[in-house]
Amino acid sequence: MSIPTAPPSGFRDFLPEQVALRQDAIATITRVYKSFGFQPISTSAVEDLAVLLGKGGDENEKLIFKIMKRGEALERAHAEKTDLADLGLRFDLTLPLARYYSKHGSTLSHPFKALSMGPVWRAERAQKGRYREFTQCDVDIIGADSWGAEVEVITAILTVFKTFGLTDVKVHVNDRAHVKAEIEAAGIPAEQQNQVCIEIDKLDKVGPEKVRESLTALVGAEKAGAVAARLLAQGAAAPANLKTISDAIQAAVPGTQIAFDPSLMRGMGYYTGPVFEFRHASLSGSLGGGGRYDKLTEKFGGQPIPACGGSIGFERLMLILEEKGMHAGSSNPDAVVTVFSDDLRGRSLETATALRAKGLAIDVYPGGGKLKAQFKYADQKKAAYAIVIGPDEAARGVMQVKALKTGEEHALTLDEACARIAARV
């Protein structure tokens, strides 16, 4: 049986041009986030299952990539018929952040503005813009109970979109505290409230009829009707706190479209207050989102600390940027230094080092063989120049610099070659 060369479903390989574009995008996002005072942190890709389970992960808890115990611990688990897994890959960056803050909070500024980026994993059905491994770009403010935290997080993310030329992003907002009050008023018992929120959150994916059917199956027709009347009715007025937040965002980022969406829940059960999503006309799903989660640190035995955060759906952002024809800054070498012979390889390496020291990107041909193959390599790398140092050039202290587009060649000293290559003459 042949071994597959494609990655598993929901996972991807990236070509050099794609990686360059992704790295440029990450650099832009990081720069904007830092301009708002967010500080970069990094958390482990692997967490104890105790971190990932039982505190508001909801549907995503069913999608965890679990890691089996190892060695004697695995053998003992098999024998005792207990859980075979003790670790899992993180499915978002918020739960790890809460653990991180619970561990390191005493050494951090208060409130703390965190910038976190990296891959996360969910074992869900792969589809366009939705993968099993994907990157999130988060900003969070921990320790601030003011609505100003929501404004800061949303404004930072909108500024990222604006930097990429996406001026038509719409912000949808709701308040989970308001939703909870409405659900309680509809007579939904506490043990069913979170599942009701999960079903309502599916409205834009499955439509109102499917949501009503699932709510009826969950709580009965009468209560389902009461929930629909309170939360899904058209023309519902936004709570006052959301109006305050919206006004402040529109003052900070003029022209921002903001809509109150009473069916917006966000999938995570750890949200306790305002929640938000970013929508773009070219996508069926959201471009990012977040909300307030004031009790998440309780999971780690500490006091509840107010917190608010938001995330950019990086893979969906990349879809939009690629469809807009965005290209990365050039990652091609300025020149390729050929290797005339093994005896002169050291001279080629010395020349490359000297040119790099002057700020140029220089590739040295890694193999050996005829110059024709080396020139082809330089063309494939989209280098502007190829450099040849044969016995004659080595003896004279010069190098042949060939412009690959025109074929023009010049015997130049190091400084002359550096000036010509830098000027793209």
Image (cartoon, grey):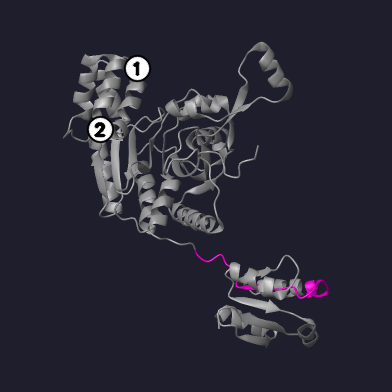
Residue 192: assigned label: 1
Q: Name which residue lies at 18% across and 33% down.
A: 236
The answer to whether residue 150 is magenta is no
Residue 41: horizontal and vertical position, in percent? Answer: 55, 45
Residue 413: horizontal and vertical position, in percent? Answer: 70, 85
Q: Name which residue lies at 72% across and 65% down.
A: 366
Q: Nearer the viewer, residue 178 or 354?
A: 354
Q: Is residue 62 visible?
A: yes
Residue 262: assigned label: 2
Q: Nearer the viewer, residue 193 or 345?
A: 345
Q: Name which residue lies at 36% across and 33% down.
A: 266
Kind of residue at badge 2: Pro
**Residue 246, above or below 18:** above
Residue 369: horizontal and vertical position, in percent? Answer: 75, 70
Q: Nearer the viewer, residue 5 or 359?
A: 5
**Residue 403, above or below 313:** below
Kind of residue at badge 1: Gln
Q: Quadrant of the N terminus?
A: top right
Residue stretch rendered in magenta on the structure: 329-347
Residue 378: assigned label: none
- Residue at the outermost top position: 80
**Residue 239, above or below 184:** below
Q: CA distance from mark 2 to mark 1?
A: 19 Å
Q: Is residue 147 visible?
A: no
Q: State the image quarter where residue 357 is shown.
A: bottom right
- Residue at the outermost right position: 343
Circle 1 residues within 10 Å: few <14, some 14–19, many ≥20:
few
Residue at disc 1, secondary structure: helix
Residue at disc 2, secondary structure: loop
